[in-house]
Image (spheres, rainbow, N blue to C red):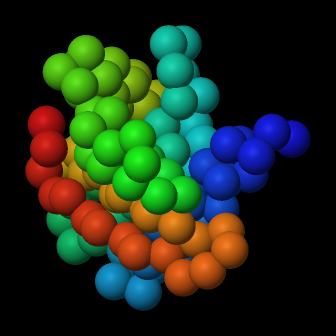
């Protein structure tokens, strides 16, 4: 497995633990739709939350949030709609979040959670 894939999986695992510690229930991970993948689907209170996780080992190539372009947001919205159409249940509200994980493989990670991006 390539180092970037290892870093990405590590970031997703850290993000899932971060969400669980914050009271979220992880409903699904790495859900594959017809046009892509949703990293984490979680629930909290009356909300289903679709979480895109972006992981970087350092800020050398920019902040992870910078990878969330308008095109990426459109794709995530389509995937969230596709997931909802196939889900057995969906909480009352739906929200799209992004979690940035910076570092983590060789030391501590910094996690930033941006709620309601799209």
The residue drawn where x is 71% and y is 43% is 5
**Residue 31 seen in render:** yes
63 sits left or right of 107 in the view: left
Q: Quadrant of residue 70?
A: top left
Q: Quadrant of residue 81?
A: top left
x 49%, y 52%: residue: 56
For this rendering, which residue is in front, 70 or 78?
A: 70
**Image position, residue 109 (x, y; %):** 49, 75
- Is 13 placed left or right of 90 in the picture? right
What residue sits 14% from the left and 44% below the top?
117
The quarter of the rendered structure image containing the C terminus is: top left
Q: Position of residue 12 (x, y in %)?
A: 56, 58
| Image coordinates for residue 83, horizontal then vertical, percent | 42, 31
**Nearer to us in this view, 101 or 107:** 107
Question: Left or right: 110 with respect to 71?
Answer: right
Q: Is residue 77 visible?
A: no
Farthest right residue?
A: 1
| Count of numbered circles in the view | 0
């Amino acid at each position: 497995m390539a180092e970037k894939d290892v870093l990405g999986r590590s970031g997703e695992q850290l993000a899932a633990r971060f969400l669980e510690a914050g009271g979220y229930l992880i409903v699904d991970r790495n859900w594959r739709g017809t046009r892509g993948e949703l990293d984490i689907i979680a629930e909290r209170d009356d909300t289903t939350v679709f979480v895109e996780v972006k992981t970087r080992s350092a800020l050398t190539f920019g902040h992870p949030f910078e990878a969330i372009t308008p095109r990426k947001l459109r794709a995530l919205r389509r995937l969230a709609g596709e997931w909802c159409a196939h889900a057995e249940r969906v909480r009352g509200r739906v929200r799209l979040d992004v979690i940035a994980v910076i570092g983590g493989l060789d030391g501590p990670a910094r996690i930033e959670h941006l709620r309601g991006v799209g």
